[in-house]
Image (tube, coloured by chain):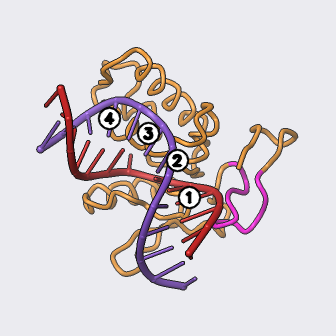
Chain colours: A orange, B red, C purple
Amino acid sequence: MPHSDEATAFFVAVYEAVQEIPYGKVTSYGHIAHLIGKPQCPRQVGQALKHLPADPANTFHHGNVPWQRVIAASGVIPRRDNPSGAARHAQALRGEGVVVTTTGGGLHVDLSGEHGWFPNVLPSKGGGGDWVNEETMFPVLF
DNA sequence: GTTTTGACTAGGT
DNA sequence: CACCTAGCCAAAA
């Protein structure tokens, strides 16, 4: 739990944005950051998800916020210091049909298939395309 | 109280 | 291609 109202608002914004990610798709921390008007705070997006409550009594919790659909812009599942957490993360994604490969102990999502980025194309690093513009869906942003 | 860390990313060397 | 830096800001130490 955040220690200020502003932080709380930020957390809520993150959770709401994450809820918009469709089943079987993934997006990046940076994308969420853009959506909530803080394009330079992808780390804080990670903070918010890290502190997402597991207790269903909360407005936002593991049950209604698909935190696992958020990964690094490179397609890598971060969790540097917590391999088991990353494994759970990967497993949850596989359950949605997302292809996750384990290369040398590092987990990363296969973005080439239909279970790639949301929106359809994301950073050049991942899909090799342009960001969607206002026509498609999200106003964007990179 | 202060300092360090971290579920990041873009841009530069 | 690998590595480094700046920016961001809440948590944890």
Q: Which residues are magenta?
A: A119-131
Amino acid type at image mark 2: Tyr
Can you tell which mark lies on residue A51? 4
Please give the residue where the numbered disc 2 appears in the rendered image.
A29
Please give the residue where the numbered disc 3 appears in the rendered image.
A44
Amino acid type at image mark 1: Ala
Instruction: Give the residue at x 43% y 60%.
Output: A77
- Give residue A59's position: percent from left, percent from top: 40, 19
Helix, strand or loop status at disc 4: loop
**Mark 3 and mark 1: Cα distance apart in space:** 15 Å
Which is more foreground, mark 3 or mark 4?
3
Mark with earlier residue (4, 1): 4
**Mark 4 and mark 2: Cα distance apart in space:** 15 Å
Is residue A129 shown in magenta? yes
Q: Nearer the viewer, residue A71 or A98?
A: A71
- Please give the chain letter of the residue carrying mark 3: A
Can you tell which mark lies on residue A73? 1
Q: Are marks 4 and 2 on the same chain?
A: yes
- Please give the chain letter of the residue carrying mark 4: A
Q: Determine contact: label 1, label 2, CB under 8 Å.
A: yes
